[in-house]
Image: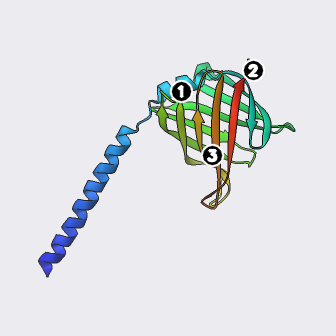
């Protein structure tokens, strides 16, 4: 009986070790080339008309801090504005979104496909976000060209997507 328990424990340990190794290997293959992704984002500098599920808006991208930070000023009709700051943090590409909800979610790039221009960000924490409180949780950008791109931001509340905001950007200058 003692040998059976020892064999069962050893088998569980081996299965956990193999699973961890497979998971570790998978994440290494999806590593983001943050520098290349950030360079692609820097090409967005300028003014954009935005059509979204909430109506028309305007966005302006600018580089600050010696080109190390890309700011997006997003203005909705009625004068409400949000700000998103993109920058490198070592080998990671991160963003902080200053939201109308009064919180500041932070996200990290999890995937970048240079061929399609798809750049996926996932929630990595933030400030002024109480447990279960609504916040922007992830974002996917489709950087189709230097004059057009699409974005989808998911707002999560109580652990579930409450709404997704789909946006289509067209460069104006």
* Disc 1 versus disc 2: nearer the observer: 2
The residue that mark 2 highlights is: 172
Q: CA distance from mark 1 to mark 2?
A: 21 Å
Give the quadrant of the C terminus: top right
Q: Is residue 155 above or below residue 10?
A: above
**Label 2, residues with CA under 10 Å away: few <14, some 14-19, many ≥20:** some
Q: Is 107 or 57 nearer to us in this picture?
A: 57
In the rendered structure, are the residues bearing label 1 and label 3 in contact, judged by CB atoms less than 8 Å apart?
A: no
Give the quadrant of the N terminus: bottom left
Q: CA distance from mark 1 to mark 3?
A: 19 Å
Q: Is residue 77 above or below residue 64?
A: below
Residue drawn at x 51%, y 30% is 116
Residue 55, position in %: x, y?
A: 80, 40
Q: CA distance from mark 3 to mark 2?
A: 28 Å
Which mark, residue 91? Answer: none
Residue drawn at x 80%, y 35% is 56
Residue drawn at x 64%, y 34% is 150
* Disc 3 versus disc 2: nearer the observer: 2
Callout 3: helix, strand or loop? strand
Classify residue 157 as left or right of residue 13. Answer: right
* Disc 1 versus disc 3: nearer the observer: 1
Residue 135, position in %: x, y?
A: 66, 51
The residue that mark 1 highlights is: 38
The residue that mark 3 highlights is: 105
Residue at the extreme bottom of the image, as rendered:
1
The earlier-in-sequence mark between 1 and 2 is 1
């Amino acid at each position: 009986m003692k040998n059976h328990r020892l064999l069962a424990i050893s088998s569980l340990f081996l299965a956990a070790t193999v699973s961890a190794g497979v998971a570790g290997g998978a994440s290494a293959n999806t590593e983001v080339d943050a520098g290349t992704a950030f360079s692609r984002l820097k090409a967005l500098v300028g003014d954009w008309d935005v059509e979204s599920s909430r109506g028309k808006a305007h966005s302006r991208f600018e580089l600050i801090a010696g080109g190390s930070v890309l700011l997006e000023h997003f203005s909705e009709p009625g004068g409400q504005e949000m700000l998103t700051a993109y920058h490198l943090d070592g080998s990671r590409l991160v963003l902080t979104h200053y939201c109308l909800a009064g919180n500041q979610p932070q996200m990290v790039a999890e995937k970048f496909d240079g061929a399609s221009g798809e750049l996926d960000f996932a929630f990595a924490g933030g400030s002024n976000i109480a447990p279960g409180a609504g916040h922007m949780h992830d974002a996917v950008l489709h950087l189709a060209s230097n004059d057009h791109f699409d974005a989808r931001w998911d707002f999560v509340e109580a652990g579930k997507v409450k709404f997704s905001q789909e946006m289509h950007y067209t460069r104006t200058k």
